[in-house]
Image: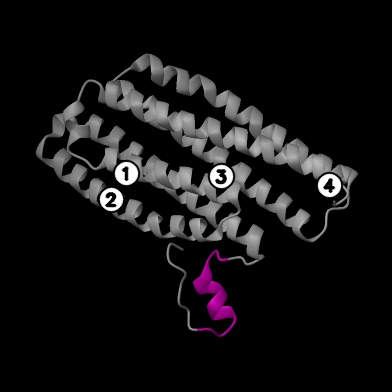
Amino acid sequence: MPVRRPIDDELQELHALLVEMADLVDEQFSNAMNSVISGNIGDASEVVERDDEVDALELAIDRQCERILALHQPVSRELRMLIVAIKINTDLERIGDHCKNVAKNAKYLARTPEVFEQTSIAEMADQSRTMLREVQDAFLERDTLKARRVLAKDRHVDRMHRETFYKLIDLAKGTPELMEAVGHVITMSKALERISDHAKNIAEAVVFLMEGIDIRHKQIQDRADGGSGTSVPGT
């Protein structure tokens, strides 16, 4: 039976904090979209208020990483875990911010639901949340195959965001009285696109954790190495 070291307990605590933050962010995402779809302003306000909880967890995770670095001498996989934890922590906090921004738009869209209904926002939200949940599973299960699947899905969200943007621009041109509502829906569409980007970032971090390979900006790395410049799907 392997000997348990003090750093193992510290890393386990770090892992638990990351899981807690991921669960909270997922809940924030669900509540934010439900508030928009239902027009429930009370639910939207709760999402905005709970963003402080996300920020508090971000600080707790940062402190735990600092504690491990100060009290122990992490090497190899342990050091990679700390690097990944810091990256994931930042992305989760950003997702929480975007959830707050989505919720803030609920009160405006409640007055003009016809604008929302002419977009792919609901589908974008489903896809982005699926990415978020799948990347959580990839991290928990240390599954790089699941992580790489998340990377590919980001392109679909990007495409829906572009389509939604141009459709809304045309709508605003034809019905100027809906200009304000169109602006809020574009803001929400961009927030969902950014959430999927952060889920992709987490997926890349999981690959780095398990394989020690940095797959970000693959085209730049290939050019620097004299390679073909072929990109990894989703990057």
Q: Earlier in the sequence, mark 1 or mark 4?
A: 4
Q: Quadrant of residue 101?
A: top left
**Residue 194 in sight from this viewpoint:** no
Q: Measure the alpha-carbon separation of dots 2 and 3.
A: 22 Å
Query: Where's residue 143, x and y in %?
Result: 56, 56
Numbered disc 1: secondary structure:
helix
Q: Earlier in the sequence, mark 2 or mark 3?
A: 3
Is 149 placed left or right of 62 in the picture?
A: left
Please name the residue that numbered disc 4 is placed on: 69
Q: Amino acid at mark 2?
A: Met
Query: Where's residue 133, x and y in %?
Result: 47, 43
Q: Measure the alpha-carbon separation of dots 1 and 4.
A: 39 Å
Discs 2, 1 touching: Cβ within 8 Å: yes
Q: Amino acid at mark 1?
A: Met
Q: Amino acid at mark 4?
A: Leu
Numbered disc 4: secondary structure:
helix
Q: Relative to 220, is 131 above or below?
A: above
Please name the residue that numbered disc 2 is placed on: 160
Q: Measure the alpha-carbon separation of dots 4 and 3.
A: 21 Å
Numbered disc 2: secondary structure:
helix
Mark 2 neighbour density, 10 Å: few (under 14) some (14–19) many (20 or more): some
Q: Measure the alpha-carbon separation of dots 3 and 1.
A: 19 Å
Q: Earlier in the sequence, mark 4 or mark 3?
A: 4
Please name the residue that numbered disc 3 is placed on: 91
Q: Earlier in the sequence, mark 4 or mark 2?
A: 4
- Confirm whether the magenta stretch covers residue 223: yes
Mark 3 neighbour density, 10 Å: few (under 14) some (14–19) many (20 or more): many
Task: Point out which mark residue 124 bears.
Answer: 1
Q: Measure the alpha-carbon separation of dots 2 and 1.
A: 7 Å
